[in-house]
Amino acid sequence: MRILYVCTGNICRSPTAERLTVAYAAEAGRDDLSAHSAGTRAMVGYGMEPTAALVLQQLGGDPTGFAARRITPAIAEDADLIITMSERQRGKVIQLAPRKMRVTFTLPEAARVHSESGAQTVAELATARAQSSAPGPEDIVDPIGRDEETFVAVGTEIADLLLPLLAGLRV
């Protein structure tokens, strides 16, 4: 399963999710799982934001060698599952790659639908979403320009939502 994570600048939230997925896959022996990330307005070529990188390391991920990139239709088309950090980004991904609408979720949305339905595949997750209603905006706050406490809260939220989702989903 190829997962693409998307945020705005591709230097905080989406690389955190990408690198946590890589760490999870290695630890769980999941060679069927790969992760990539991109941004809707990426800081192309930049490494992770330093505070986000520190939080990622504290969560067990490795920021080494990361370079931000901008999402393209080809990048989106290559993914089996696309997870964005906000509903706005989800909308932008769908505009860019309309055929990926069914498999594009915000992270809180995917985690909620998975928890409610017990979906075990991306297809089951997509079907379950159609029978579920969102409690309101399902976004992960952008920590850029905020204090270290916010970065820690955002990193922890990503890990808390992501790890049960990864453990429960297969292709």
Image (cartoon, rainbow, N blue to C red):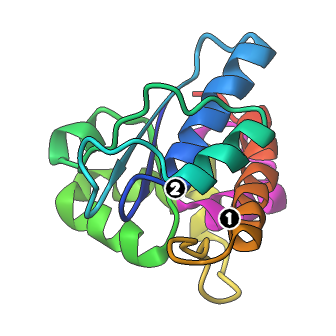
Q: Residue at 69% x, 35% y: name it.
A: 169
* Up-down relation of residue 83 to residue 112 (above or below): above
Tag 1: Cα neighbours inside 10 Å, few (<14), some, or many (≥20)? many
Q: In this figure, which residue is indicated by the disc labeled 2?
A: 12
Check disc 1 and give the amino acid type.
Answer: Phe
Q: In this figure, which residue is indicated by the disc labeled 1?
A: 151
Check disc 2 and give the amino acid type.
Answer: Cys
Q: Where's residue 83, x and y in %?
A: 50, 53
Q: Residue at 65% x, 81% y: name it.
A: 134
- Judging depth in this view, the residue of 51 and 108 nearest the camera is 51
* Up-down relation of residue 111 to residue 1 (above or below): below
Q: Could you say which quadrant of the image residue 142 lies in?
A: bottom right
Q: Is residue 131 visible?
A: yes
Q: Residue at 30% x, 32% y: name it.
A: 78
In magenta segment, residue 113: yes
Q: Residue at 71% x, 67% y: name it.
A: 148
Q: Which residues are magenta?
A: 106-123
- Looking at the image, residue 14 sits to the left or right of residue 95; the answer is right
Q: Where's residue 117, x and y in %?
A: 78, 56
Q: Where's residue 24, x and y in %?
A: 73, 27
Q: Are marks 1 and 2 in contact (CB under 8 Å)?
A: yes
Please tell me how many numbered marks the rendered image carries. Answer: 2
- Mark sitting earlier along the chain (1/2): 2
- Looking at the image, residue 140 sits to the left or right of residue 87; the answer is right
